[in-house]
Image (cartoon, rainbow, N blue to C red):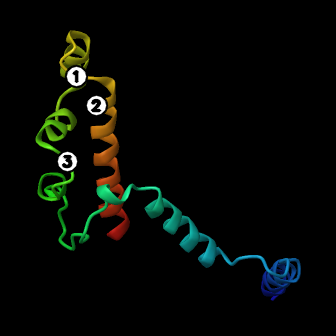
Amino acid sequence: MSTCIKIQHLVVIQLRYLPVGKMTWESLAAKKRASVVDAIPPEWRLKEVPSGDSVMSVPKESGILSSEELNITESSATDLVRDLAAGNLTSVAVTTAFCKRAALAQQTVRSH
């Protein structure tokens, strides 16, 4: 019985000291989710979020990554370093490709 009283007491304290106008955890979470989506450039956003179990084909099927960007993101680190050193790739191209792919991953993971 004392455990129940302590638990109730903690809940009362938490509610009593919650400042008026403070957001609930649910509204804070919703606000954070919205800010993550808003941080993704519109041209990198999926028109439709996939609903299947596997999202491995999203980068190719979305049309958001160019064929060069797909090649970059599917290359090994060794190949990327070699191509960067040889001047075949720019750091901007590599960074952009991986940022686009990360944006796709964020959208597909968030939905499952």
What separation in Å lies between label 1 and label 3 (alpha carbons)?
A: 16 Å
Indicate the quadrant containing the C terminus: top left, top right, bottom left or bottom right: bottom left
Residue type for callout 1 = Leu
Which residue is identified by label 2? 94
Q: Which mark is residue 65?
A: 3
Residue 30 falls left or right of residue 80: right
In-image side of 101 versus 20 (left or right): left
Closer to the chain start, of discs 1 and 2, is: 1
Question: Which residue is at a point 36% across and 57% down the rendered structure image?
Answer: 106
Is disc 2 surrounded by few (<14), some (14 to 19) or many (20+) residues within 10 Å? some
Callouts 1 and 2 close, C-beta under 8 Å = yes
Tell me where residue 107 appears, x and y as whole percent: 34, 62
Residue placed most toward the observer, 77 or 45:
45
Q: What residue type is labelled 2?
A: Val
User: The residue tagged with tag 3: helix, strand or loop?
Assistant: loop
Quarter assignment of residue 63? bottom left
Q: Position of residue 35 (x, y in %)?
A: 52, 63
First-in-chain label (2 vs 3): 3
Q: What residue type is labelled 3?
A: Leu
| Identity of the residue drawn at 81% across and 86% down | 8
Residue at 21% x, 53% y is: 64
Answer above or below: position of 60 versus 1: above
Q: Which of 5 and 81 is in front in this view?
A: 81
Q: Name the residue under label 1.
A: 89
| Helix, strand or loop status at disc 1 | loop
